[in-house]
Amino acid sequence: MQFQNNLAFAKSLDNLDALSKYKSEFIFPQHNGKDVIYFTGNSLGLQPKRTKKYVDEVMNDWANLAVEGHFYAEKPWWDYHERFAVPLGKIVGAKPSEVTVMNTLTVNLHLLMVSFYRPTKNRYKIICEEKAFPSDQYMFQSQVHFHGYKTEDAIIELKRREGEHNLRLEDILAKIEEVGDELALVMIGGVNYYTGQVFDIKTITEAGHKVGAMVGWDLAHAAGNIALHLHDWNVDFASWCSYKYMNSGPGNASGCFIHEKHHHNDELPRFAGWWGHNKERRFKMEQTFEPVHGADGWQISNLPILSLAPYLASVEMFDEIGMEKIIQKRNQITAYLEFILHEIDKEVKGHFEIITPQHPEERASQLSVYFHGEGRSLFEYLMKNGVVTDWREPNVIRFAPVPLYCSFEDMYHFGQILKSGIKK
Ligand SMILES: *Cc1c(COP(=O)(O)O)cnc(C)c1O
């Protein structure tokens, strides 16, 4: 399709958009009496209007039933999490028994590493990406220290080539091959938080397995954003937060995937708690731990129902729409934003460059733009003019045109605001 940088054209795309009605299902911060243009759904998704109902329901059940709510609430609390298995499984491409919700992302990755990072004398190295999300870097460092290894020795970072912004698949595969039988674990973010690069999860997982390593994924920027087939891709484990593309509120509960092939392996160590114990016998308060055979067997505590409620609202919304439609719109609106950026860049003469890969297979709902010149003041100008973005050192602004609540018209208006900010 030949895009045009004008309001009538943007509106015509909105008219054709099957998801346009969902914009009104979200609550937007206001700027001069109007909804902001929200580009930071990759950091904290907007609040769906339906969420309050889910939270109120728990508050009311708690008020009216107190402890009896565990069994007699509208949605009983003792197995509340089981409502996620089917719809969340569809979002990440997993069997219902392979997904669960619990804790928060970094905590879950640590817990999963207890089971899946089992270093031995010869096989103890971890491959991760250079400049991984800081929490992941701290996690890797503290895990290898915990096992008695040194960061420099045990952690192998995948490097970008000189002058390039993104990792090349061939370089990742070559590194896996090179570390070979010293490699215990490969763990990468499915979508890089800084550049928006999407990795080939299937191929990288296969390559890790070929040399005998476990392969896990941090899907913080991938869940609810890209097509995932975790079961078919034979991924060992994965975890994601629910507050980015999944719109379930600040710091909210995380999701986990553990491949079925590991469910019956009682040799795998884990840090256990009563919520992972055989469901039928949980309240018998027995001494011996007998895990649920499934991802739920990794749960530890009684679940935070008030935080699962917004997550459930969101998962049900995703289920109602389906990832396919979300991805279809995502591709179109990201391409339209890219077009608008290029048009404006022509007018302001090479003021910036998009560092996110151009190829649609290698990117999703985010374009990261490197500004040559006044990045920081431009970011502030955008914020003052009702465009919410985020700033990353040294000079990058990230834009996530989230398909559920961003419109093509937003992209057009954003272009005009950007142009006036640069000309100023
Ligand atoms: C957002 C994000 C996190 C955040 O972790 P929390 O434990 O939820 O604070 C971790 N890793 C990546 C890659 C992220 O993008």
Image (cartoon, rainbow, N blue to C red):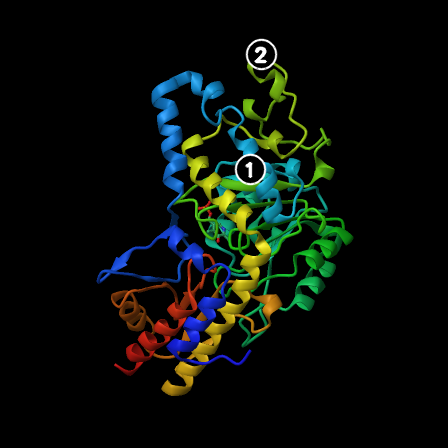
Residue that mark 1 sits on: 84
Camera-near label (1 vs 2) is 1
Q: Find residue 95 and report its horizontal and vertical position in percent.
A: 67, 40
Q: Determine the residue positioned at 43% across, 20% down.
A: 69
Classify 10 Å Cα crowding around label 2: few (below 14), some (14-19), many (20 and above). few
Q: Find residue 92 and report its horizontal and vertical position in percent.
A: 61, 48
SS category of the residue bearing label 2: helix
Separation of marks 1 and 2 at Cα, in angstroms: 25 Å
Q: Find residue 125 and report its horizontal and vertical position in percent.
A: 65, 50
Horizontal side of 46 relative to 146 (left or right) equals: left
Regarding residue 394, the answer to whether it shows in the image is no
Q: Is residue 55 above or below residue 418?
A: above
Q: What amino acid type should be assigned to the residue bearing mark 2?
A: Lys
For the N terminus, the quadrant is bottom right
For the C terminus, the quadrant is bottom left
Q: Earlier in the sequence, mark 1 or mark 2?
A: 1
The circle drawn on residue 276 is none
Regarding residue 419, the answer to whether it shows in the image is yes
Residue that mark 2 sits on: 284
Count of all numbered marks drawn on residues in the image: 2
Q: What amino acid type should be assigned to the residue bearing mark 1?
A: Phe
Q: Determine the residue positioned at 46% across, 36% down.
A: 308
Towards the viewer: 294 or 137:
294
Q: Quadrant of residue 385?
A: bottom left
Towards the viewer: 133 or 149:
133
